[in-house]
Image (tube, helix red, strand yellow):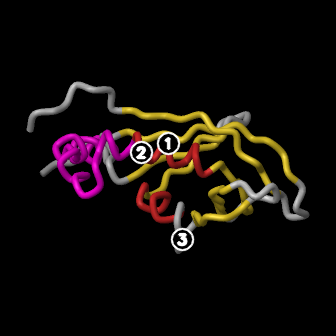
Amino acid sequence: MKRNTRSTVISELVELDFVDDEGRRACLDAEMVYDRRDPFAMSMVFKTLPPVTWTFSRELVMTGMYEPAGDGDVHVWPCLSGDGEAVVIFEFCSPDGEVLVQAGLREVARFVHRMLDSVPQGSEEQFLDIDETINQLLGEAGDIAV
């Protein structure tokens, strides 16, 4: 398969509003990252010490910009902020707790459009490198005799 020589990684720095259990807010810097070598997924990297990365379906964000989405550890839905600004809410759940953050819809939409320019919806399979995936799986499993 002929590969496009454009950069495979797209990222967007975002300032998130972190909302705690008592409704208090704080700013949290993060980066939304998409690598077309993993065409079905995207990541949110929280710029904390140490950085925390959550990886989830890109479809989750594309749907969550318009309606509630997510059945697992990550949920995404549209909302209005207290100031009436259109935002996207991200909820991340783990055994250690939950984090609720919101990002401006414009920033999220800009990232999604760049992601779709790189890999149009429905064409993700064309960007999968099955040989590389198999090599990674075999490499992680150690030396396997066949």
Q: Is residue 129 magenta?
A: yes
Q: Amino acid at mark 2?
A: His
Instruction: Give the alpha-carbon distance from disc 3 to disc 1, as whole Å.
Output: 18 Å
Left or right, 74 with respect to 121, comes to right
Left or right, 142 with respect to 14, comes to left
Q: Looking at the image, tell me whether mark 2 or mark 3 is earlier in sequence order.
A: 3
Q: Residues within 10 Å of mark 1 (few under 14, many from 20)?
A: few
Residue depicted at 81% across the width and 55% down the height: 83
Residue depicted at 64% across the width and 43% down the height: 52
The kind of secondary structure element at disc 2 is helix
Q: Which image quadrant is residue 23 in?
A: bottom right
The residue that mark 3 highlights is 67
Q: Quadrant of the N terminus?
A: top left
The kind of secondary structure element at disc 1 is helix
Magenta part of the protein: which range?
A: 115-140
Q: Residues within 10 Å of mark 3 (few under 14, many from 20)?
A: some
Residue depicted at 41% across the width and 45% down the height: 113
Q: Amino acid at mark 3?
A: Glu
Residue depicted at 66% across the width and 56% down the height: 87
Q: Position of residue 16 (x, y in %)?
A: 71, 45
Q: Is residue 117 magenta?
A: yes
Q: Which image quadrant is residue 127 in?
A: top left
Q: Position of residue 90 (x, y in %)?
A: 63, 58
Q: Position of residue 69 (x, y in %)?
A: 52, 70
Q: Which image quadrant is residue 15 in?
A: top right
The residue that mark 1 highlights is 110
